[in-house]
Image: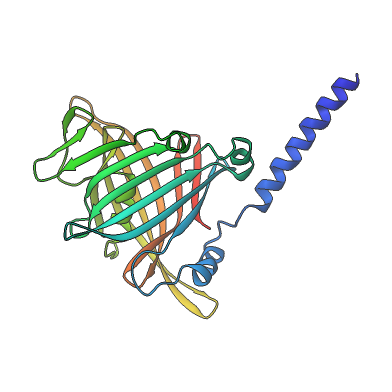
Amino acid sequence: MRNKIKLNSIIFLGMGLAILVILLRPSKDLKNILRSVGQKYVVSKGFPPLRYNIDLMNIPMGYLDLDIQDEDENGKDFYRGQALLKPPALLNNISFDNLGFHMTSFIDKQSLLPRRFETIDVYSAKKGKNKRTIEYHHPELFMHYKTQDEDIEDDTRDYVSLLIWLMSQNYERDNLVKSTLNVNRKIYLVVGKVKDFEIFHVDQHDYTVVYLRVQFLQIKEKYGVVSSIPIDIAMVELQDTYIPLLMKIRKGWLRSDIWLN
Protein backbone atom coordinates (compact mmCIF):
# COMPACT_ATOMS: atom_id res chain seq x y z
CA MET A 1 0.00 0.00 0.00
CA ARG A 2 2.81 2.40 0.94
CA ASN A 3 4.65 1.61 -2.31
CA LYS A 4 1.48 2.41 -4.26
CA ILE A 5 1.14 5.74 -2.43
CA LYS A 6 4.80 6.56 -3.15
CA LEU A 7 4.36 5.67 -6.83
CA ASN A 8 1.25 7.87 -7.11
CA SER A 9 3.10 10.72 -5.41
CA ILE A 10 5.98 10.43 -7.87
CA ILE A 11 3.58 10.36 -10.83
CA PHE A 12 1.69 13.44 -9.60
CA LEU A 13 4.97 15.23 -8.86
CA GLY A 14 6.23 14.44 -12.36
CA MET A 15 2.99 15.65 -13.92
CA GLY A 16 3.16 18.83 -11.88
CA LEU A 17 6.74 19.52 -12.94
CA ALA A 18 5.86 18.87 -16.59
CA ILE A 19 2.92 21.30 -16.41
CA LEU A 20 5.14 23.88 -14.68
CA VAL A 21 7.79 23.59 -17.40
CA ILE A 22 5.15 24.05 -20.12
CA LEU A 23 3.62 27.07 -18.35
CA LEU A 24 6.98 28.75 -17.75
CA ARG A 25 8.39 28.25 -21.24
CA PRO A 26 9.00 31.40 -23.34
CA SER A 27 6.00 32.82 -25.19
CA LYS A 28 5.31 32.02 -28.86
CA ASP A 29 3.34 35.26 -29.29
CA LEU A 30 4.87 37.26 -32.15
CA LYS A 31 4.71 40.55 -30.27
CA ASN A 32 6.60 39.07 -27.33
CA ILE A 33 9.15 37.51 -29.68
CA LEU A 34 9.61 40.88 -31.43
CA ARG A 35 10.13 42.52 -28.06
CA SER A 36 12.99 40.07 -27.54
CA VAL A 37 14.31 40.95 -31.01
CA GLY A 38 14.46 44.63 -30.05
CA GLN A 39 16.40 43.77 -26.89
CA LYS A 40 18.80 41.14 -28.21
CA TYR A 41 19.02 40.89 -31.96
CA VAL A 42 19.01 44.34 -33.56
CA VAL A 43 22.08 44.44 -35.81
CA SER A 44 23.45 46.91 -38.33
CA LYS A 45 24.69 44.28 -40.74
CA GLY A 46 25.07 40.51 -41.09
CA PHE A 47 23.71 37.67 -38.98
CA PRO A 48 23.40 37.86 -35.17
CA PRO A 49 23.77 34.72 -33.01
CA LEU A 50 20.31 33.18 -32.62
CA ARG A 51 18.72 30.78 -30.12
CA TYR A 52 15.47 28.93 -30.80
CA ASN A 53 13.20 26.99 -28.46
CA ILE A 54 11.82 23.70 -29.80
CA ASP A 55 8.71 21.84 -28.74
CA LEU A 56 6.86 18.76 -29.95
CA MET A 57 3.15 18.45 -29.18
CA ASN A 58 3.62 21.37 -26.73
CA ILE A 59 6.32 19.43 -24.85
CA PRO A 60 9.70 21.26 -24.60
CA MET A 61 12.33 19.32 -26.56
CA GLY A 62 15.34 21.62 -26.20
CA TYR A 63 16.85 24.41 -28.20
CA LEU A 64 18.81 25.25 -31.34
CA ASP A 65 21.73 27.69 -31.38
CA LEU A 66 22.67 29.20 -34.75
CA ASP A 67 25.87 31.18 -35.26
CA ILE A 68 26.99 32.51 -38.67
CA GLN A 69 30.48 33.93 -39.10
CA ASP A 70 32.42 35.48 -41.98
CA GLU A 71 35.46 33.40 -42.87
CA ASP A 72 38.33 33.57 -45.37
CA GLU A 73 40.22 30.61 -46.81
CA ASN A 74 42.85 30.93 -49.54
CA GLY A 75 41.49 34.34 -50.47
CA LYS A 76 37.91 33.08 -50.80
CA ASP A 77 35.16 34.54 -48.61
CA PHE A 78 32.52 32.24 -47.17
CA TYR A 79 30.12 31.84 -44.26
CA ARG A 80 30.69 29.31 -41.51
CA GLY A 81 27.21 28.42 -40.27
CA GLN A 82 27.22 26.46 -37.01
CA ALA A 83 24.10 24.94 -35.49
CA LEU A 84 23.90 23.11 -32.17
CA LEU A 85 20.86 21.07 -31.12
CA LYS A 86 20.59 20.48 -27.37
CA PRO A 87 17.96 18.77 -25.17
CA PRO A 88 16.15 20.48 -22.25
CA ALA A 89 18.42 21.55 -19.38
CA LEU A 90 17.29 18.78 -16.99
CA LEU A 91 17.94 16.01 -19.51
CA ASN A 92 21.22 17.63 -20.49
CA ASN A 93 22.37 17.69 -16.85
CA ILE A 94 21.36 14.06 -16.30
CA SER A 95 23.44 13.07 -19.34
CA PHE A 96 26.44 15.07 -18.05
CA ASP A 97 26.21 17.32 -21.12
CA ASN A 98 26.71 14.36 -23.47
CA LEU A 99 23.57 14.84 -25.56
CA GLY A 100 23.31 17.12 -28.57
CA PHE A 101 24.23 17.42 -32.21
CA HIS A 102 26.63 19.74 -34.06
CA MET A 103 26.12 20.81 -37.68
CA THR A 104 28.57 23.04 -39.56
CA SER A 105 28.16 24.30 -43.12
CA PHE A 106 30.82 26.14 -45.12
CA ILE A 107 28.89 28.33 -47.54
CA ASP A 108 29.95 30.34 -50.58
CA LYS A 109 28.93 33.97 -50.05
CA GLN A 110 27.97 34.64 -53.65
CA SER A 111 25.83 31.59 -54.45
CA LEU A 112 24.93 30.69 -50.84
CA LEU A 113 25.68 27.08 -51.79
CA PRO A 114 27.55 24.84 -49.33
CA ARG A 115 31.08 23.65 -50.05
CA ARG A 116 31.21 21.25 -47.13
CA PHE A 117 28.82 20.02 -44.44
CA GLU A 118 30.03 18.44 -41.18
CA THR A 119 27.97 16.72 -38.47
CA ILE A 120 28.82 15.02 -35.19
CA ASP A 121 27.02 14.30 -31.93
CA VAL A 122 28.28 15.89 -28.72
CA TYR A 123 29.43 12.62 -27.12
CA SER A 124 31.44 11.56 -30.19
CA ALA A 125 33.02 15.01 -30.40
CA LYS A 126 34.16 14.71 -26.77
CA LYS A 127 35.68 11.32 -27.59
CA GLY A 128 37.61 12.86 -30.48
CA LYS A 129 35.84 10.86 -33.18
CA ASN A 130 35.75 11.97 -36.81
CA LYS A 131 32.97 14.13 -38.15
CA ARG A 132 30.60 12.94 -40.85
CA THR A 133 31.56 15.09 -43.84
CA ILE A 134 29.87 15.72 -47.18
CA GLU A 135 31.75 17.70 -49.84
CA TYR A 136 29.65 19.43 -52.48
CA HIS A 137 30.82 19.93 -56.06
CA HIS A 138 28.00 21.96 -57.60
CA PRO A 139 29.68 22.79 -60.94
CA GLU A 140 30.12 19.05 -61.56
CA LEU A 141 26.73 18.20 -59.98
CA PHE A 142 27.90 15.64 -57.44
CA MET A 143 28.58 15.33 -53.72
CA HIS A 144 31.24 13.16 -52.10
CA TYR A 145 30.60 11.18 -48.91
CA LYS A 146 33.18 8.70 -47.59
CA THR A 147 34.17 6.81 -50.77
CA GLN A 148 31.03 7.50 -52.79
CA ASP A 149 30.02 10.17 -55.27
CA GLU A 150 26.32 10.89 -55.73
CA ASP A 151 24.46 13.13 -58.17
CA ILE A 152 22.93 16.37 -56.89
CA GLU A 153 20.95 19.29 -58.27
CA ASP A 154 22.70 22.59 -58.94
CA ASP A 155 20.92 24.20 -55.93
CA THR A 156 21.36 21.39 -53.36
CA ARG A 157 21.84 22.59 -49.79
CA ASP A 158 22.07 21.16 -46.27
CA TYR A 159 19.92 22.21 -43.30
CA VAL A 160 22.15 25.09 -42.21
CA SER A 161 22.87 26.58 -45.62
CA LEU A 162 19.18 26.29 -46.55
CA LEU A 163 18.21 28.35 -43.49
CA ILE A 164 20.85 30.98 -44.28
CA TRP A 165 19.63 31.04 -47.90
CA LEU A 166 16.05 31.67 -46.70
CA MET A 167 17.29 34.47 -44.44
CA SER A 168 19.06 36.14 -47.38
CA GLN A 169 16.20 36.37 -49.91
CA ASN A 170 14.38 39.50 -51.04
CA TYR A 171 10.71 38.80 -50.35
CA GLU A 172 7.74 40.33 -52.12
CA ARG A 173 4.06 39.42 -52.02
CA ASP A 174 3.36 36.10 -53.80
CA ASN A 175 7.10 35.69 -54.40
CA LEU A 176 8.23 32.08 -54.99
CA VAL A 177 11.51 30.58 -53.75
CA LYS A 178 12.92 27.18 -54.68
CA SER A 179 15.90 25.07 -53.60
CA THR A 180 16.86 21.45 -52.96
CA LEU A 181 17.63 19.94 -49.55
CA ASN A 182 19.94 17.01 -48.87
CA VAL A 183 18.97 15.07 -45.72
CA ASN A 184 21.03 11.97 -44.98
CA ARG A 185 21.55 11.59 -48.74
CA LYS A 186 17.80 11.87 -49.39
CA ILE A 187 16.81 14.74 -51.65
CA TYR A 188 13.84 17.04 -51.00
CA LEU A 189 12.49 19.76 -53.27
CA VAL A 190 11.91 22.91 -51.21
CA VAL A 191 9.30 25.33 -52.55
CA GLY A 192 8.19 28.43 -50.69
CA LYS A 193 5.64 31.16 -51.34
CA VAL A 194 5.16 34.49 -49.59
CA LYS A 195 1.63 34.54 -48.15
CA ASP A 196 1.45 37.95 -46.50
CA PHE A 197 3.19 40.86 -44.78
CA GLU A 198 2.27 42.47 -41.46
CA ILE A 199 3.53 45.55 -39.62
CA PHE A 200 3.96 45.22 -35.84
CA HIS A 201 4.50 48.24 -33.58
CA VAL A 202 6.40 47.09 -30.50
CA ASP A 203 8.26 49.28 -27.96
CA GLN A 204 8.37 52.33 -30.24
CA HIS A 205 9.66 50.27 -33.19
CA ASP A 206 7.92 49.17 -36.39
CA TYR A 207 8.76 45.66 -37.60
CA THR A 208 7.87 44.18 -40.98
CA VAL A 209 7.03 40.49 -40.70
CA VAL A 210 6.75 38.25 -43.77
CA TYR A 211 4.74 35.02 -43.66
CA LEU A 212 6.16 32.23 -45.80
CA ARG A 213 4.65 28.80 -46.51
CA VAL A 214 7.38 26.26 -47.37
CA GLN A 215 6.77 22.73 -48.65
CA PHE A 216 9.40 20.01 -48.33
CA LEU A 217 8.64 17.48 -51.07
CA GLN A 218 10.32 14.09 -51.30
CA ILE A 219 10.26 13.05 -54.94
CA LYS A 220 11.08 9.70 -56.55
CA GLU A 221 11.34 9.19 -60.29
CA LYS A 222 8.88 6.30 -60.47
CA TYR A 223 6.30 7.62 -58.01
CA GLY A 224 6.52 11.43 -58.13
CA VAL A 225 5.89 13.19 -54.80
CA VAL A 226 5.89 10.53 -52.07
CA SER A 227 5.74 12.83 -49.03
CA SER A 228 5.18 16.48 -48.21
CA ILE A 229 5.99 18.42 -45.06
CA PRO A 230 4.53 21.95 -44.79
CA ILE A 231 6.23 24.58 -42.62
CA ASP A 232 4.83 28.05 -41.93
CA ILE A 233 7.55 30.59 -41.20
CA ALA A 234 7.22 34.13 -39.83
CA MET A 235 10.34 36.25 -40.41
CA VAL A 236 11.21 39.81 -39.47
CA GLU A 237 13.23 42.11 -41.70
CA LEU A 238 16.31 43.55 -39.96
CA GLN A 239 18.50 45.65 -42.22
CA ASP A 240 19.69 43.28 -44.98
CA THR A 241 18.62 40.06 -43.24
CA TYR A 242 15.37 38.22 -42.50
CA ILE A 243 15.37 36.61 -39.05
CA PRO A 244 12.98 33.64 -38.54
CA LEU A 245 10.74 34.33 -35.56
CA LEU A 246 8.42 31.34 -35.53
CA MET A 247 8.34 28.09 -37.54
CA LYS A 248 5.28 25.85 -37.34
CA ILE A 249 5.37 22.25 -38.59
CA ARG A 250 1.99 20.56 -39.07
CA LYS A 251 1.94 17.06 -40.56
CA GLY A 252 -0.98 14.79 -39.64
CA TRP A 253 -0.83 14.33 -35.87
CA LEU A 254 2.61 15.95 -35.73
CA ARG A 255 2.72 19.40 -34.16
CA SER A 256 6.04 21.10 -33.65
CA ASP A 257 7.00 24.75 -33.09
CA ILE A 258 10.42 26.41 -33.25
CA TRP A 259 10.58 30.02 -32.08
CA LEU A 260 13.14 32.69 -31.31
CA ASN A 261 14.15 32.99 -27.68
Question: In the orientation shown, which residue stands out farthest toward the right?
Answer: 1
In front here: 151 or 227? 151
Which residue is rendered at x = 35% and y = 39% of the image?
A: 119
Residue 21 in picture, x, y percent from top left: 67, 47
In front here: 259 or 100? 100
Question: In the orientation shown, which residue stands out farthest toward the left?
Answer: 140
Above or below residue 149? Residue 68 is below
Asked whether, in this view, residue 125 is left or right of residue 113, the answer is right
The part of the image, by quadrant, that contains residue 80 is bottom left
Question: In the orientation shown, which residue stands out farthest toward the front?
Answer: 128
Which residue is rendered at x = 46% and y = 52% of the image?
A: 65
Asked whether, in this view, residue 197 is left or right of residue 57, the answer is left
Residue 24 in picture, x, y percent from top left: 67, 53
Which residue is rendered at x = 45% and y = 42% of the image?
A: 250
Q: Dividing the image into 4 quarters, which one contains the N terminus?
A: top right
Asked whether, in this view, residue 163 is left or right of residue 126, the answer is left
The part of the image, by quadrant, that contains residue 55 is top right
Residue 129 in picture, x, y percent from top left: 38, 33
